[in-house]
Image (cartoon, grey):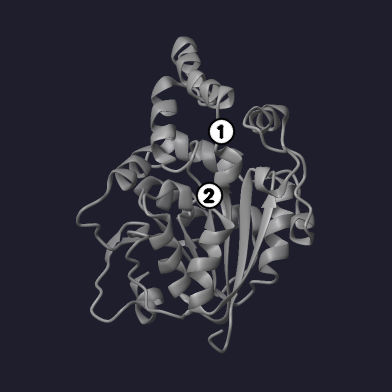
Amino acid sequence: MKAKIKSYLKPGIEVEERGSYLECPIVDPSEAIKANAYYFGNHEWAEEYLIYCHRNEAFKSRWTAAIGDWSNKIIVDVGCGPGNIFATLKGKPKLLIGVDVAPTSLELASEVGYLPMLADATNLPFKSGFADIVTLNAALHHCEDMEAVLKEAARLVKPGGVLITDHDPQRSAWNYKGIAKLLWIARLYYYKIIGHGFHKTSDQQLWGLACEIHHKPGHGVTKEMFNNILKPMGFNVRVFPHNHELGAEVLKGNKGKASFKYRLGNLLSGRNPNADSSALSLMCVAEKSYVLL
């Protein structure tokens, strides 16, 4: 594994082989890293995530349209988890590097077809400008410093390459106010009464919520964040709001319709549930220019 990746590492960087994955040791892990390492380090939870999340036809259609043909290309999937993107899209990239902080997820990603690397997404061990495609799916909101992670991932993209992010909550859509915010808070008490929420157990629920640092009212990604960080780095930035249910149509400006509870949340917050700003997620497709813009 080291031989495959050596030429893409920063000078002086040493990585260690840990069975089915490589490791660039994280000296002082943040609380977010610890939470994600614990949750996605649980084999049962990681396997459930691989089987059930981001595996539908809408996801496949949307991502295929954004990526195009990645045959014989170098891919870096930051926050790869157990390998959902490649497990869904398949294909024959030249090199598929998956970066994560959870050893168990990296082991699963290896089985899917990744060359897995344990590393801190705010300080990646790779040299700049070597990747054809860099992906972050449902990854940014799991990180304490979303801007730093986005900038570091973008650093890896070569001229003519593309950076793609998706499935991070749009701040304006999740910024519940008034009654909507009270209902958001109340759901946590409901979870405690029934013993779990959308996960199977209270422990899984606890750590699942702990992972999602920026998935709460007042948090999330914005179109401005993508533009402010990526444009100065030479990217042509396109941002597509959507509600998870549509495929390639999202890249044509269609966002689909959110389910009732999310529409109600926006209505109770005084917002138009049909507005772009009320769409649950933002997909960013940013192409690196050959000449600095």
Q: Which amino acid does label 1 sit on?
A: Tyr
Q: Position of residue 166 (x, y in %)?
A: 59, 54
Tag 1 or tag 2, which sits nearer the N-term?
2
Point out which mark residue 226 bears.
none
Q: How far apart are marks 2 and 1 (CA)?
A: 20 Å
- The image quadrant where one finds the N terminus is bottom left
- The image quadrant where one finds the C terminus is bottom right
Q: Mark 1 points at which residue?
A: 176
Q: Residue furthest top?
A: 193
The one nearer the camera, 175 or 166, is: 175
**Residue 230 in view (yes/no):** yes
Q: Where is residue 205 in the image (x, y as percent from the top left)?
A: 44, 27
Crowding at mark 2 (Cα within 10 Å: few <14, some 14-19, many 20+): some
Dot 1 lies on which element?
loop
Crowding at mark 1 (Cα within 10 Å: few <14, some 14-19, many 20+): many
**Quadrant in which residue 286 is drawn:** bottom right
Q: Closer to the observer: label 2 or label 1?
A: 1
Q: Name the residue under label 2.
A: 138
